[in-house]
Amino acid sequence: MSVLGLGYLGATQAIVLAEQGHTVLGIDPDPKRVALLQEGHLPFFEPGLKDLLEAARANGRLSFSTEYDERLSSIDVHLLCVGTPAGSADGEVDLSAVFSAGLSLGAFLKENSVVVGRSTVPVGTAEKFKRVLSDASQGITFSLAWNPEFLSEGTALADSLKPDRIVVGAEDDRAVSILRTLYEDQIASGVPFLVMDIATSELVKVASNSFLAMKISYINGVAEVAEKSGASTAKIAEAMGLDPRIGKRFIQNGLGFGGGCLPKDLLGFTRTAEKLQATGLTKLLSAAVEINAQRISAVIEIAKEKMGDLEGRNISVLGIAFKPNTDDSRESAGRYLAMEFSRLGANVSVHDPIASKFSAQDIGVEITSDLGSALASAELVVVATEWPEYAKLYLDSSSSFPERFVIDGRSVIESSAWIDAGWSVIKLGEGQKLYPSQRRY
Ligand code: UGA
């Protein structure tokens, strides 16, 4: 089979399929990415994946190329995994890679092959993609299916091997039966296999991601109220989460959601709802976008309130990855905070244990992997990612600053250790004041 697009989704997909015994040709126009994969390196950090890549390369089942060429004409199943990033207009999705892959693949499409879209797309995209593919293949018969991917960064491998569900949008039984065979191990282990029409399958993905984003924004909205009422969001979420109808996951308050998926899909789905005049949903989703942005401004406001003018002040942001176990800093809280503090004239340093090695340093701020110096040089520390190393830190109590503040944006630090070392602690979502002697319940 072929995997078209070797970003996060495509590279993981190609490696996992090769591991499962398929012969896979991965294609991506980016020569750097392809060269890295050919040499056995991942273009991103993902736990556990590098070992599988090495194994797949060793058994010869996996090859990579920058070219759509004759090799494709002997392949029966093509998986479209290209990126669908945010477009230029607000909420618009850039689908150029989808259509360009369709054009390139069409020229080599084999009779009766199956093309499976895995990329996240706005509803109606598959229909347009099919037209592009039909025109480019000039009358070749093929089956199209859409099979959205639900893997999360940091747990991509486990999510691919044992997803919560397999969703298949199809127009004919042939595509369904090929996908049933492809996923036979997962289906045998009890993973639900849901078949539906293509438009419905496109919507399942964006509706799911938007719901997750809304859950996070809901608890962050509650956090605003808790902060002002002297209440604890952590305790509210703990109690709410015990209701199985609500569930414990995705109600962790803090700096909100980032990454390449939730922000883009929420905006994209808002745009779709707006275009289709689903006004209620548009409002609901727009509020989730607004609350997410508000969490960043809240931190800036707290910093100004505690420290006054931020010009020339020394601020360290801990964590630029949008969540732990990834080097991805797209739309991350750490990135937005560092840029905003820097715009306000502060001396900003950013620490990240992994993203410092990988991320493009395009935020105009130096990223360091030296946590000690990031702490020693700061009069304000903002914890923006819940990396486990931030939970327990060695804190030096000697300091040249008259006052030092830490804002915990992810409920990760051990407050008492910071307080003992002379820091004032502010935990987002916690209205209760933290003093060393205060009894906590
Ligand atoms: C998300 C979805 O969770 C996946 O199901 C989906 O397949 C994927 O997008 C995709 O579309 O490809 P991912 O982007 O890897 O996965 O990240 P999440 O684990 O969803 O986390 C997103 C953000 O929400 C992170 O910044 C995280 O810190 C934040 N978050 C998460 C919270 O602020 N609170 C929570 O309770 C949970």
Image (cartoon, helix red, strand yellow):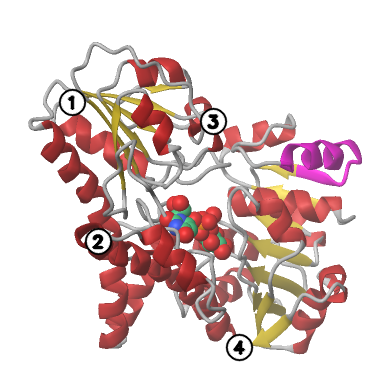
Give residue 63's quadrant in the image. Answer: top right
Q: Residues within 10 Å of mark 2 (few under 14, many from 20)?
A: many
In the image, which is nearer the foreground, mark 4 or mark 2?
A: 2
- Which mark is on residue 224? 2
First reached walking from the N terminus: tag 4 or tag 1: 4
Compared across the picture, whether 36 is left or right of 423 comes to right
Q: Amino acid at mark 4?
A: Asp
Residue at mark 3: 354
Instruction: For the N terminus, give its image quadrant.
Output: bottom right
Q: How many marks?
A: 4
Q: Main secondary structure of the magenta part?
A: helix
Q: Was residue 97 drawn as part of the magenta stretch in this picture? A: no
First reached walking from the N terminus: tag 3 or tag 4: 4
First reached walking from the N terminus: tag 4 or tag 2: 4
- Which mark is on residue 219? none
First reached walking from the N terminus: tag 2 or tag 1: 2
Residue at mark 1: 346
- Calculate the distance from the C-alpha at mark 2 to the C-alpha at mark 3: 31 Å
Is residue 126 among the parts visible in the rendering?
yes
- Calculate the distance from the C-alpha at mark 1 to the C-alpha at mark 3: 24 Å
Q: Residues within 10 Å of mark 3 (few under 14, many from 20)?
A: many
Compared across the picture, whether 151 is left or right of 266 comes to right
